[in-house]
């Protein structure tokens, strides 16, 4: 049985931060029902951008959900949502500041109808404080949490990290909080209000940069940008370009911080002479002569492709990885052997491949399903939850309160 089988979630999230949260609980078995505006849906679908198909962006963040379209701008639509509410354990939203208040979908209003509801809110800067009304997306949250300040080279400007940790990193923390609240509810019967700030969530991933800068461990000075390099030989190294490659991602990153790790690296490169070279005899010497040391390593990596270098060093015990670009992720023999890449059928795009979900649980497994089309499950959910079907559903549809897939 899936771990979260029985948990039901009303999902009013959009884009990525909130949708990553609800997708995570869906992948553990929760029944996630995504509430969307008829004819428009989650802006992440890209419907407003023209081609009529759901975007890869939407499909990557909304697997294993059901889509119900309700016009919440109309009083009857909001009433319908309140009628559905007692059938659910959790309500999640990540709309902009003030939207839920304008719709009358506050925690207080929902709690009157369903006292044990778990009401989760994801906001850029939280619900209070001087930045509470500032709108936020992933890079904004990352910059506000200090991630830009520690990304990039020492002599360059702050830089946006490539991965969307501000959005999905916040979503994962909220998913954990929701699951914790659900476990608590099973014990006490009580729901609760959950709030998470993207800025504050992002600081969780800043603890090591803060702690690893001398003198900055308690926030008294700013951590510095250091690029790819650490002490001694730890760095990113160019490799022999792969056939047909322009060399943009033909690199290998390795870590060799201690003398033992350095000796292992030298043996793997078949360069025992480097271990007795006075310039590299101990950690202090390797730091002092780091540029000369890295030139020796660079000369070796340039003789091998990134995959060859990773095989040689990795099998010898050196922590390292070839630079995987996004093409490499989907053509990765390691992922393939572990069954991580998911091949699924999408009604608009046909066969597609998606990156999988990392946790592997012995007693819980949920097959990945394609993200829903807009309104795909409106009739199904309203019939199951409220007994609305036939003429009554048709009337709501004619009034523009709900819509079905394809309307």
Image (cartoon, rainbow, N blue to C red):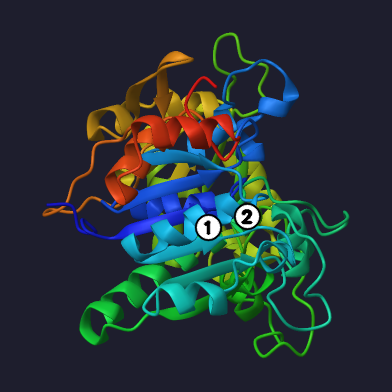
Residue 97: give its label: none
Q: Does the residue at mark 1 contact the one at mark 2 (Cβ under 8 Å)?
A: yes
Q: CA distance from mark 1 to mark 2?
A: 6 Å
Q: Is residue 237 above or below residue 2?
A: above
Q: Nearer the viewer, residue 392 or 244?
A: 392
Q: Nearer the viewer, residue 239 or 58?
A: 58
Packing grade of label 2 (10 A; few <14, some 14-19, many >=20) is few
Task: Name which residue lies at 41% across and 47% down.
Answer: 33
Helix, strand or loop for disc 1? helix
Res. 350 visible in picture = yes
Helix, strand or loop for disc 2? helix
Task: Name which residue lies at 34% across and 35% down.
Answer: 389
Q: Looking at the rendering, in which quadrant would you find the C terminus?
A: top right
Please give left or right for residue 139 compared with residue 339 in the image: right
x and y percent of residue 185 in the render? 29, 79
Q: Is residue 51 above or below residue 388?
A: above
Q: Nearer the viewer, residue 30 or 385?
A: 385
Instruction: Locate residue 251: give its quadrant.
Output: top right
Question: Outermost residue, top direction?
Answer: 244
Residue annotated with mark 1: 79
Residue 75: give its label: 2
Packing grade of label 1 (10 A; few <14, some 14-19, many >=20) is few
Task: Name which residue lies at 40% across and 73% down.
Answer: 114
x and y percent of residue 346 in the render? 41, 20
Res. 269 visible in picture = no
x and y percent of residue 376 in the render? 43, 30
Task: Name which residue lies at 66% across and 52% down.
Answer: 228
x and y percent of residue 237 in the render? 61, 40
């Amino acid at each position: 049985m899936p771990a979260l089988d029985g948990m039901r979630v009303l999902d009013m999230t959009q884009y990525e931060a909130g949708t990553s949260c609800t997708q995570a609980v869906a992948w553990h078995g929760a029944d996630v029902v995504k509430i969307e505006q008829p004819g428009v849906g989650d802006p992440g679908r890209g419907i407003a951008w023209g081609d009529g198909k759901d975007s890869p962006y939407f499909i990557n963040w909304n697997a294993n959900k059901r889509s119900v379209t309700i016009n919440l701008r109309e009083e009857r639509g909001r009433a319908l949502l309140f009628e559905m509410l007692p059938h659910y354990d959790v309500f999640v939203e990540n709309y902009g500041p003030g939207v839920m208040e304008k719709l009358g979908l506050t925690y207080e209003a929902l709690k009157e109808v369903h006292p044990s509801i778990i009401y989760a809110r994801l906001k850029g800067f939280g619900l209070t404080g001087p930045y509470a009304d500032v709108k936020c997306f992933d890079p904004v949250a990352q910059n506000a949490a200090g991630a830009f300040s520690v990304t990039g080279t020492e002599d360059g400007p702050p830089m946006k990290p490539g991965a969307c940790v501000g959005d999905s990193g916040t979503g994962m923390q909220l998913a954990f909080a929701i699951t914790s609240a659900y476990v608590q509810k099973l014990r006490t019967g009580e729901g609760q209000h959950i709030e998470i700030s993207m800025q504050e969530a992002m600081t969780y991933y800043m603890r090591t940069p803060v702690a690893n800068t001398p003198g900055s461990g308690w926030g008294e000075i700013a951590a510095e940008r250091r690029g790819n390099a650490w002490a001694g030989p730890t760095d990113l190294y160019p490799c022999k370009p792969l056939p047909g490659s322009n060399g943009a991602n033909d690199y290998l990153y390795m870590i060799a911080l201690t003398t033992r790790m350095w000796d292992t690296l030298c043996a793997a490169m078949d360069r025992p002479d480097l271990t007795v070279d006075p310039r590299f005899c101990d950690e202090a010497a390797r730091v002092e002569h780091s540029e000369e040391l890295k030139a020796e390593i660079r000369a070796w990596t340039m003789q091998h492709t990134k995959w060859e270098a990773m095989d040689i060093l990795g099998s010898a015990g050196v922590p390292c990885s070839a630079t995987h670009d996004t093409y490499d992720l989907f053509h990765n023999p390691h992922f393939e052997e572990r069954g991580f890449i998911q091949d699924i059928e999408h009604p608009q795009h046909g066969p597609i491949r998606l990156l999988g979900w990392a946790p592997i649980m012995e007693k819980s497994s949920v097959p990945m399903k394609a993200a829903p089309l807009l309104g795909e499950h409106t009739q199904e959910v309203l019939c199951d939850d409220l007994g609305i079907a036939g003429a009554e559903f048709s009337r709501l549809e004619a009034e523009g309160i709900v819509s079905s897939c394809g309307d």
